[in-house]
Image (cartoon, rainbow, N blue to C red):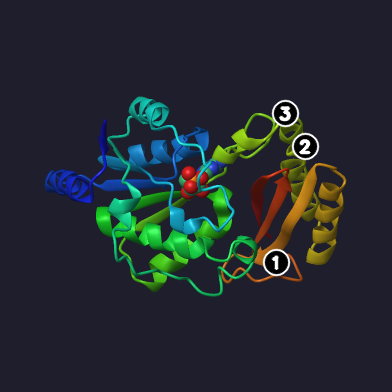
Amino acid sequence: MEIIREISMLRARVKEARSHGKLVGLVPTMGCLHQGHLALLAKARAENGLTILSIFVNPLQFGVGEDYEEYPRDLESDAVQVEKAGGHIIFAPTVKEMYPQGYATYVDVERLTAGLCGASRPHHFRGVTTVVAKLFNIVIPDNAYFGQKDAQQALVIQRMVRDLNMNVLVHIMPTVREADGLAMSSRNSYLSPAERRAALILFQTLLQVSEKIQGGQRDASAIQAFIVKEISSEPLATIDYVSIVDTEEIRPVKKISGRILIALAVRFGKTRLIDNIIVEV
Ligand code: AMP
């Protein structure tokens, strides 16, 4: 396992692997790896001859007053985990390597980024799509792996790839959860013990919703009201949004029909957590 910081060096490694006929898999992350990331890495490892995991805390996707500075960083422990999981390369560029002096180009997916997380984090997705487009251009992977945990991000990236004819297969992997149901996230480390307990309300509520839909409930506003009531019953929780949308345009739906994303963002103290389920009826 090798840690590479320069784009030119990474390109040389990719070129060499390709000359041996290897498929190239990319797992973009911001590091501080957990089982969610490692599930993506395992899938990439199984499907490609060269597996690259990128670690880059991308300043472009953090808004003013967000946690860019305090976002957890632990390259040493990440390297141990990637090595153990059989990953071949960690690409960990500096901010200067990715955005040198004079940088001026951005990728913006319209409409799909207006609601949900885009509403409270206005430039977030522009930062995400810009850095992912750059990583795709740097690596030119055959396969790239993302998590369902960030459902809107996954849909936005799939749209970018489709709209810009990027020649990469995007794979979306299921959300990996702690034993008690909390979706794994590098940001869970911010939670106090009481907030950590309170945060269980998210998945518990989503499970109940899933049961209601299986039981025949199709009224989106009734489901939304139920989620708001359940989460509001937790004193440490402050709702950012609860959205029930289609998975094509990410627009609110009235009726549960077809493939539907039920997504939420909730604050526990200073920590904003997201979770979601996709239902298909
Ligand atoms: P991050 O480091 O948080 O930017 O996440 C990097 C990638 O890992 C993204 O594609 C995320 O969607 C994915 N990911 C993060 N947490 C999870 C999780 N609990 N389960 C599955 N994928 C995850």
Q: Is residue 72 left or right of residue 239?
A: left
> Which image quadrant: the C terminus?
bottom right
**Where is residue 59 drawn, in percent x and y?**
45, 54
Question: Disc 3 versus disc 2: distance between alpha carbons?
Answer: 9 Å
Question: Disc 2 versus disc 1: distance between alpha carbons?
Answer: 31 Å
Dot 1 amino acid type: Ser
Marks 2 and 3: in contact by CB < 8 Å? no
Dot 3 amino acid type: Pro
The residue to which callout 3 is attached is 193
Q: Nearer the viewer, residue 187 or 244?
A: 187
- The local secondary structure at tag 3 comes to helix
Dot 2 amino acid type: Ala
The residue to which callout 1 is attached is 257
Dot placed on the residue nearer the N-terminal end, 2 or 1: 2
**Where is residue 37 drawn, in percent x and y?**
47, 39
Instruction: Name which residue lies at 42% across and 67% down.
Output: 160
Mark 3 or 2, which is nearer the eye? Answer: 3
Instruction: Name which residue lies at 52% across and 58% down.
Output: 153
Residue 135 figure quarter:
bottom left
Question: Disc 1 versus disc 3: distance between alpha carbons?
Answer: 38 Å
The residue to which callout 2 is attached is 198
The local crowd at label 2, few if under 14, some if 14 to 19, many if 20 or more residues have their Cα within 10 Å, is: some
Vertical relation: 84 (above or below) 107: above
**Where is residue 5 drawn, in percent x and y?**
26, 42
Task: Examine the rendering and report whether any part of residue 141 can be seen.
Answer: no
Vertical relation: 130 (above or below) 68: below
